[in-house]
Amino acid sequence: MRKIFIAILLCMSFTSGFIHAQTSVQILLGTQGFGLDINKSVSEKFSTRLGISSIPFSIDNIVVNFHNVNTNDNIKANFSNIHFMLNYTPFFKDNFRVVGGVAYIIKANGKANIVPTDSYSYGNIQLTKEELGTAVMNVSWSGLVPYLGVGLLNGFPTRYFNVSVDLGTYYLGSPKANMYGTGLLSGSYIYTEQLQKNVKGYKWMPLLQVNFNFNFRANSTY
């Protein structure tokens, strides 16, 4: 929560500069979730964006048969970041932008809980679901990550409102992964190395985003 508050203060301070520049406030909706950007021009061809976005994700009651044991699983994921982007408009019209930037990951993880719902028989041995326990898989990313993409349509409304689009990807690097459990599944940690190998290729986060741009005063031109 403190990091989010700091990000909001940064956005507020960012808006106080460039008094004569074009300015828009952007509400973001896309694969990185919901967010807010402050978009400011710094020259005829360059503009900067500072903002924050977050996407919480959860799926419950996933029924799976795991080694002849019925389980009721749930998956939770979260991706939250503070980002700074530089837009370059190579042509006279503002309908195409090259976008590069960097994001600081506040939180980026995925967690799967595997919970047996039935007892399990092994020969003459009968095990209850409580004795079986639960297993947990975690995957997470952290740190500063680069972004590269393109933007379509103008991010500065001529009057009060318009819509623009961003297409690109973050390079997250390989995630950290671990696995653990309780009860008879407490030995699940031995699969951590295999889980790490299985997810090492999850380095990219594609972005498709619609920006709802608002202008609260007349934009000046260069």
Image: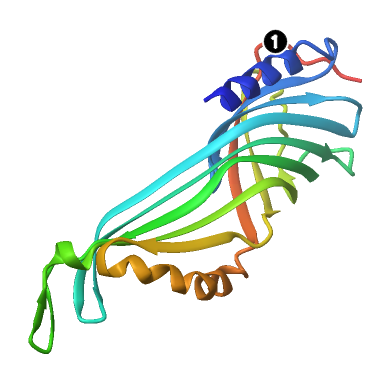
Describe the colour scheme in one phrase. rainbow
Please determine whether, in this image, residue 74 is positioned above or below residue 212.
below
Mark 1 residue type: Arg
Disc 1 designates what residue?
217
Residue extending farthest to the bottom is 123
Name the quadrant containing residue 140.
bottom right
Most foreground residue, 111 or 213: 111
| CA neighbours of label 1 inside 10 A, class few (<14), some (14 to 19), many (20+) | few
Q: Position of residue 54 (x, y in %)?
A: 53, 38
Secondary structure of the residue carrying tag 1 is loop
Residue drawn at x 89%, y 44% is 90
Q: Position of residue 175 (x, y in %)?
A: 60, 59
Residue drawn at x 49%, y 69% is 192
Q: Is residue 188 visible?
A: yes
Most foreground residue, 217 or 48: 48
Please determine whether, in this image, residue 72 is positioned above or below residue 21.
below
Name the quadrant containing residue 193.
bottom right
Q: Position of residue 32 (x, y in %)?
A: 56, 45
